[in-house]
Image (tube, rainbow, N blue to C red):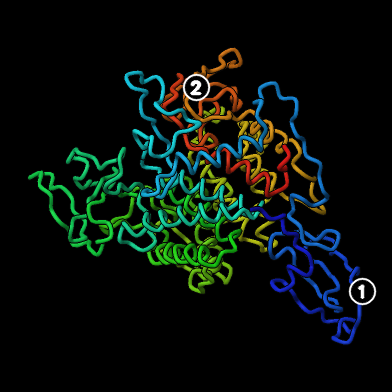
Amino acid sequence: MRRKERKMTARTILPLLIMPIALAACSPSAECSPDEWSCSEDARVLTACVDGKIQTIDCGSEGLLCEQGECVLPSRYGSPQWSKCENDPMATTESLHDKMLYYEEIARRLHIHPQLGWISNVVLECDGSDCTHPAVPESQATWRDVERWLSGENDGLWNALYMAAEAYRYAATGDREALDNLRILLEGERRRMDITGVPGLFTRQMIPLGVDGIACPDDLAAYEPDVEKDDNKWVRINQQGCVEVVDPDTKQWQSTDHCGLGEFAGWCWLDNVSQDEYAGHMYALAAIYKFADDEQIRAQVRDMLQQIGDHLVDNQLRFVDWDGRTTEHGRLYAMALDNYPGFNAAMALAFVKVCAAATGDERIENFYQDCLLQRSGRLECLDYPAESPRPYTEHMEEPGLYVGQDSCLSNWNNISMYMAALHDLFLFEHDPSLVEFLQAHLQNTVFAPADKPRPLSEQNNAWFDIIYAAFKRLGPGSDGPAYEAVENAVCMLRQFPASKHTPTVDAPMEKVKSTCTDRLGHEIGDYPRQVAERCPGTFLWWGNPYSLGSCTEDLRVVHQPADYLLAYWMARYFGFIDENM
């Protein structure tokens, strides 16, 4: 069941945004005709006749623009005609819509075990003694045909990006199945937080009892606490509901006083959660809260964001683990000296803003406004030696996205996290001056910097292209829609394979003119591989497009489709593609 996209007209948006006009002509006795309307010069404010009275509607306060008597998405302002990329020689024969239908169907049928509650890559059972083929083909296999669930330390990140896809699906279509999917996944998200026993803290990975194809580690060393807290370690929950670990000297299990987890007796989970996990969680929770109009779902999301916001404020922008220690990559304050200050600053601003906007919590909002943005004057609010009162937006001038000669040492994990954080800020931050800063930052520092090799604008990344095209400056006074970025995004989606089993793909060395070494010591080229030239992965858009890696066909390994679905549904919501493509 689907609904048409809801237009933000004067009548529909009025209950949220109405402000009476202080003019005599707009007194209660004044009359107007229904077709009377006007837009402010900057297109932020709509003046319209509603129920016979002139009212003003602040479209900009919801990130919208005024056009033709309505509040519209900036990406739809001026009704731009987007390229359909109909002649790409590397496009699949399947349409964008047909691929979406298949990936939505296989996500539920194959990739989500009802007892796990998250989406996962899978290995299908062998066809008898022939393990080059699955016993049941991908087109028919269900979660019951899975031999192994490819769980890993970033389960929460990848699952969250699929949740975000379903949120955008609902925003674009109103399909109630998207909400049904979110209910299943949000229960898994709740467990992913509750199992740690620390409000606001997610686990990296969790393994329940009684699910074939996934099990806790057998190696006792995996449960030995790490002295330096720079390795991820497993813990187990005993029948008394307490976390237990393995003594490194005796090799015996020992219970801790971290208890109250009886719901998860017999489960194990991986500690030391990091920023990248939270980049995904916050992206998903932000999108769900923004677009899902189901109050039960919104209440679940609001509760989790309240816990996260409290955790960040109470711990001064640190993620504090079950053992009372800060996780290795759990410092969000700008001068943590474990990452570029601008990178940490963007994470902190995005995470806290989403929590403040969803919860309405005054303490979290004040922390965002007065501590992170210093809006009420100089305030010493973060008790760290290298920190000094300074708006976190100033740190963002150098986020450290393009590193080394020819940007060869760039961290694509950080780049993806940064784009995710900007997405979250744009969804909820509508202060005109801050939006103006963020849009200039997106344009000149992040997506298309004039002085940086390998800019995001050239990386054949549909997800990045869509985020940029949706949130760049648009409307009056702008340089107009991002036609090139949208065309590239559509072409990459057209090239996206119709199946995510592992194919045989070799690096297109004939297109590589020079190489360099990346931060991990791997050789990379100077050619950003197009989607048709890349090996599928858990989330294609997260990886380095300059990789020279190859893959060999394996029909039993099937990756989950969050990458295609998130880019597709975002493109649908922002109007870059339609259901007929």
Identify residue type, mark 1.
Ser
Q: Quadrant of residue 322?
A: bottom left
Above/below status of 487 relative to 578: above
Above/below status of 31 relative to 229: below
Question: How would you rate the neighbour count of disc 2 (Cα within 10 Å): few for under 14, some for 14-19, many for 20 or more?
Answer: some
Above/below status of 164 relative to 145: below
Q: Regarding mark 2 in the picture, which secondary structure is present there?
A: loop
In this rendering, would 307 be left or right of 24? left
Foreground residue, 291 or 187?
187
Pointers 2 and 1 in contact (CB under 8 A)? Answer: no
Identify residue type, mark 2.
Pro
Q: Which mark is residue 33?
A: 1
In this rendering, would 449 be left or right of 323? right
Q: Regarding mark 1 in the picture, which secondary structure is present there?
A: loop
The residue lying at 68 percent from left, 46 percent from top is: 572
Residue 193 in the image, given as x and y percentages of width and height: 37, 57
Q: Which residue is mark 2?
A: 503
Residue 401 in the image, given as x and y percentages of width and height: 54, 40
